[in-house]
Image (spheres, rainbow, N blue to C red):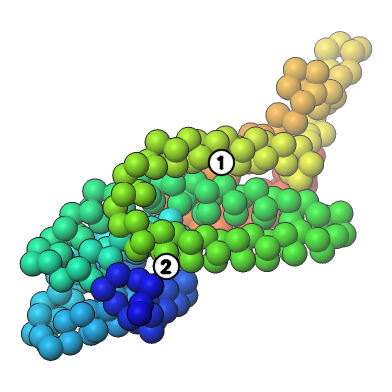
């Protein structure tokens, strides 16, 4: 007897494996059409509605034409719940599933992005980068461990979403928001601490008042240590938000600016 409601263990394993393998940040396959969602749910639709091929096509089109934009790891909570609802075969299962998706994909995207896309990746990538500068490969291992943690989270979230349906997502919303805020703050603290040790920028400008000569960098250090690295980091983040700007363009811009400013004796 299947351990999962309304579907066989074989079908459930197919759903779980597909959900684990899918890494798209939002479930569309092109534009805003959620192709991966339909692909993941196909084994379920085939088993549950196998004697109604026209209904399968109708449900495919329903999910294809309904917008779905969320983060892939936390989104597995929602995907599991949607599969559980669809497996019940109630008359309005797809309506309920899509309504749940539309109402919760935004909050789950915020949670997932904060913890898995921004928080975890930023924290562990920063650690790995700093260790690499120190000549240690341990940071790479830490990043691989985080990838395994993310994969385990996808499995747990999908299982929980399917087994608990909508109950877990709705009753645990406040706790998840607290975790999201905590991880976001942690990520900002780590990035802030990494700036002085990883971003190197100083000025060679010397200020002269009569016979008094004072390097501008000494003045800046007495007012705000590491001000220039912080301003450079802030400026790069701002550039990333500019339309048409890419990381490759920013790297070349930094290289060009460094050469020019060094040539005229500013840095």
- State the image coordinates of residue 100 (x, y, percent, origin top left): 23, 54
The image's mark for residue 183 is 1
- Which quadrant of the rendered structure holds the C terminus? top right
43, above or below 36, in the image: below
Rendering coords of residue 78 (x, y %):
33, 58
Point out the frontmost of discs 2 and 1: 1
Of the pair 22 and 191, the residue shown nearer to us: 22
Residue 205, how many percent across, how many down? 79, 30
Query: How many numbered dots are placed on residues in this image?
Result: 2
Residue 248 shows in this picture = no
Between 78 and 12, which is closer to the camera in this rendering? Answer: 12
Residue bearing mark 2: 24
Would you say 205 lies left or right of 54 here? Answer: right
Report the front residue among 212 and 129: 129
**Residue 14 location, quadrant:** bottom left
Residue 101 % position (x, y)? 25, 56
Callout 1: SS? helix
Q: Is residue 119 left or right of residue 260?
A: left
Q: Label 1 crowding class (10 Å Cα cut-off): few <14, some 14-19, many 20+?
A: many
Residue at point 72% right, 41% down?
194
């Amino acid at each position: 007897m299947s351990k999962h409601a309304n579907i066989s263990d074989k079908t459930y394993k197919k759903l779980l494996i597909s959900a684990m393998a899918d890494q798209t940040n939002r479930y569309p396959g092109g534009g805003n059409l959620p192709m991966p969602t339909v692909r993941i749910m196909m084994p379920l639709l085939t088993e549950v509605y196998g004697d109604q091929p026209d209904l399968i096509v109708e449900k495919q089109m329903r999910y294809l034409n309904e917008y779905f934009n969320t983060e892939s790891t936390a989104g597995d909570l929602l995907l599991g719940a949607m599969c559980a609802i669809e497996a019940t075969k109630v008359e309005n299962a797809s309506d309920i599933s899509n309504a749940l998706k539309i109402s919760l994909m935004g909050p789950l995207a915020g949670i997932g992005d904060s913890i898995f896309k921004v928080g975890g990746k930023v924290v562990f990538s920063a650690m790995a980068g700093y260790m690499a500068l120190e000549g240690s490969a341990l940071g790479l291992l830490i990043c691989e461990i985080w990838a395994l943690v993310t994969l385990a989270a996808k499995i747990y979230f999908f299982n929980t979403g399917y087994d608990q349906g909508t109950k877990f997502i709705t009753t645990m919303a406040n706790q998840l928001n607290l975790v999201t805020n905590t991880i976001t703050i942690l990520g900002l603290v780590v990035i802030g601490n990494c700036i002085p040790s990883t971003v190197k920028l100083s000025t060679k400008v010397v200020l002269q008042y009569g016979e008094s000569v004072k390097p501008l960098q000494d003045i800046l250090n007495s007012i705000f240590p590491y001000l220039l690295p912080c301003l450079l980091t802030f400026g790069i983040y701002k550039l990333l938000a500019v339309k048409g700007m890419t990381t490759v363009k920013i790297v070349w811009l930094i290289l060009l600016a460094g050469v020019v400013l060094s040539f005229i004796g500013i840095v």
